[in-house]
Amino acid sequence: MMKRNASIIHIVGNRPQFIKLAPLYKELKSRNYGQCIIHSGQHYDANMSEVFFHELNIPQSDLNLKVGSGSHAEITSGVMLGLERELNKLRPDLIILYGDTDTTLAGALVASKLNIPMAHVEGGVRTHHKENPEECNRIVADHLSDILFCPDRASLESAVKEGMQEKAFLTGDIMYDTFMSMNTRNKEVSEEIILMTWHRQENTETRSRMSSIIEFIKKLDGKIICPMHPRTQKCLKNFDLWNEIESIANLQIVEPVGYMEMIELMNSARLIVTDSGGVSKESSFAGAKCIFMLDLDIWEDLVSNRWILKMNPEDDMSVASALAFAKEAVRVDGSERPKFYGDGHAAVKMVDLLEKHRFI
Ligand code: UD1
Ligand code: UDP
């Protein structure tokens, strides 16, 4: 069949973006649009990047800018230089940006200077803390984008509050699409676990913060599995905390896992302890209650329903409440799980909106 005329470029570079990309890439493909993936190279280890393209059946990116690791300015400027060069050659009709990373920020700045229309997947999400690096990236990406796909009620409301009502649409959450399409589980859980992920800047940049998280882990009962982000591994080693964390008998630290294995782990968990934006929300898809280890605003409806409990690991009262929450946490059946993130068909709504508003 003939390709439709519009050419679309997806800009990704981080683990959660590959997971968000898959359903939208497939929906556009089913409607025969010409599309291309630019990978910034911000995440590059096989278990942080390649595994997701393989498991989610999306083609390895057409172009990899190989920016690698560095400070915020190094990553942002590196991606900007590479993108400007490539977008000047490719001149697409539409750029699609995902989430809140430095790759997203660089994409927004370059595409807007080149006057290329932009769509932002996960528009309107706010932590309401400007010192949080992801908040800064989201504010810039949203305000520069031409259309925002908001995953839930709260994100749409935030977009409207910031004067973006004309371009913001509630689509449901694309991570729910991915989860639903990959979740084939119907077997009983043989052993319930606590699943832990930990990587955010606020929780890895000082030794005292990392120590307080280790003290919290020591007080948790039951088997804990932690697929550990490379940043956290490096910081624990640099702060000389690696031996201490490794000696916690009920904690099993493993390398980052692929998405299929991650779904298995989430489906086995009675509790998820995390500082990940994505994992804290996926906890509700999988039926595990969640302790979120940052005092930022996050998934408002899940917090007000006490599905997610926010914890400041450096505050004794907050840790005590989290330990009580952890003790009580039990798995929740499908029919009783909160449903704030759409129907698993956000990608269809996104492409419908792009067509209706003549972006493609
Ligand atoms: C980035 C995003 C964060 C997102 C996260 C998803 C920014 C500012 N942060 O954080 O919003 O939640 O991705 O996972 O963009 N590293 C490796 N191998 C890799 C990737 C990273 O070893 O493949 C190590 C490097 O030491 C690097 C560190 O992890 O310096 C941090 O990586 P970086 O991409 O800067 O930030 P993330 O913590 O991954
Ligand atoms: N994830 C994964 N393997 C892991 C850890 C996370 O597949 O070892 C998935 C997780 O299920 C979610 C996404 O990666 O879909 C979240 O990425 P991350 O926590 O790195 O970023 P954030 O959501 O905080 O931006």
Image (tube, rainbow, N blue to C red):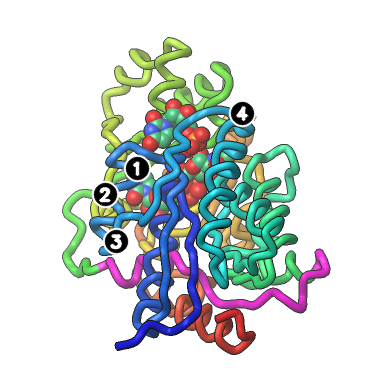
**Mark 1 and mark 3: span between their CA atoms?**
16 Å
Q: Label 4 amino acid?
A: Asp
In this rendering, is residue 103 above or below 187?
above
Q: Give residue 105's position: percent from left, percent from top.
A: 63, 49
Q: Give residue 115's position: percent from left, percent from top.
A: 69, 64
- Give the magenta-colored segment's residue range: 161-183
From the Cβ of disc 4, is ligand 2 less than 8 Å away? Answer: no
**Mark 2 and mark 1: span between their CA atoms?**
7 Å
At numbered mark 4, what does the secondary structure look like: helix, strand or loop? helix
Residue under numbered circle 1: 48
Labelled disc at residue 59 = 3
Answer few, some or many: residues within 10 Å of disc 1's Cα (few below 14, many 20 plus, some between 14 and 19).
many
Q: Label 1 amino acid?
A: Met
Sequence-wise, which precedes: disc 1 or disc 3? Answer: 1
Quadrant of image for the N terminus: bottom left
At numbered mark 2, what does the secondary structure look like: helix, strand or loop? helix
From the Cβ of disc 1, is ligand 1 less than 8 Å away? Answer: yes
Residue under numbered circle 2: 51
Quadrant of image for the C terminus: bottom right
In this orientation, does residue 172 appear? Answer: yes
Residue under numbered circle 4: 316
Q: Give residue 159's position: percent from left, percent from top.
A: 74, 67
From the Cβ of disc 2, is ligand 2 less than 8 Å away? Answer: no
In this orientation, does residue 226 appear? Answer: no
Q: Label 3 amino acid?
A: Pro
Contact check, label 1 and label 3, Cβ < 8 Å? no
**Mark 4 and mark 2: span between their CA atoms?**
39 Å
